[in-house]
């Protein structure tokens, strides 16, 4: 499965660049780190590969009210591309499965 993410700062209406993101997979006794990167100038990370199972993206939101956002999701079709946008504002966040 290919995975991408896009972090947007909803308060400023701009991409959130240089946000640290970790991709992890549940391994039965905890979490295994699969990848780590920072968003680019457009707020994106692309090209991560993973397989079926439970995964999570952990976003380092740099000391905001929510200093860390964790999005846990399950991959049932490893052939499908998954795009996980994160929209940030000072006191809220939202995410969804994009295309």
Image (cartoon, helix red, strand yellow):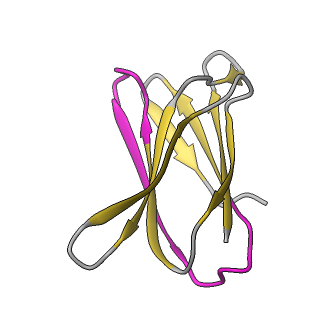
Query: Residue 12, image x and y in percent?
Result: 65, 15
Query: Residue 83, image x and y in percent?
Result: 69, 57
Above or below for 47 versus 60: below
Query: Is 62 part of what is drawn in magenta?
Result: yes
Q: Which of 53 and 48 is in front in this view?
A: 48
Which quarter of the figure has residue 76? bottom right
Q: Specify the farthest residue to the right.
A: 99
The residue at the point 67 percent across, 72 percent down is 1
Apparent side of residue 9 relative to residue 90 in the rendered image (left or right): right
Above or below for 33 versus 46: below
The residue at the point 57 percent across, 76 percent down is 51
Query: Is 68 part of what is drawn in magenta?
Result: yes
The stretch in magenta equals 59-82
Query: Residue 4, image x and y in percent?
Result: 68, 52
Q: Nearer the viewer, residue 53 or 96?
A: 53
Q: Specify the farthest residue to the bottom.
A: 76
Apparent side of residue 43 relative to residue 25 in the rendered image (left or right): right
The residue at the point 54 percent across, 31 percent down is 88
The residue at the point 57 percent across, 69 percent down is 50
Apparent side of residue 7 relative to residue 74 in the rendered image (left or right): right
- Classify the position of the C terminus by image quarter: bottom right
Above or below for 37 versus 24: above
Q: Specify the farthest residue to the left.
A: 29
Number of labels in the image equals 0
Q: Which of 85 and 91 is in front in this view?
A: 85
Query: Residue 68, image x and y in percent?
Result: 35, 37
């Amino acid at each position: 499965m290919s995975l991408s993410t896009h972090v947007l700062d909803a308060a400023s209406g701009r991409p959130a660049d240089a946000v640290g993101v970790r991709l992890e997979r549940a391994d039965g006794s905890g979490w295994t780190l699969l990848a780590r990167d920072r968003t680019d100038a457009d707020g994106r990370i692309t090209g991560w590969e993973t397989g079926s199972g439970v995964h999570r993206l952990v976003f380092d939101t740099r000391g905001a009210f929510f200093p860390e956002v964790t999005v846990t999701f399950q991959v049932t079709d490893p052939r499908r591309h998954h795009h996980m946008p994160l929209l940030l504002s000072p006191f809220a966040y939202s995410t969804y499965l994009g295309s």
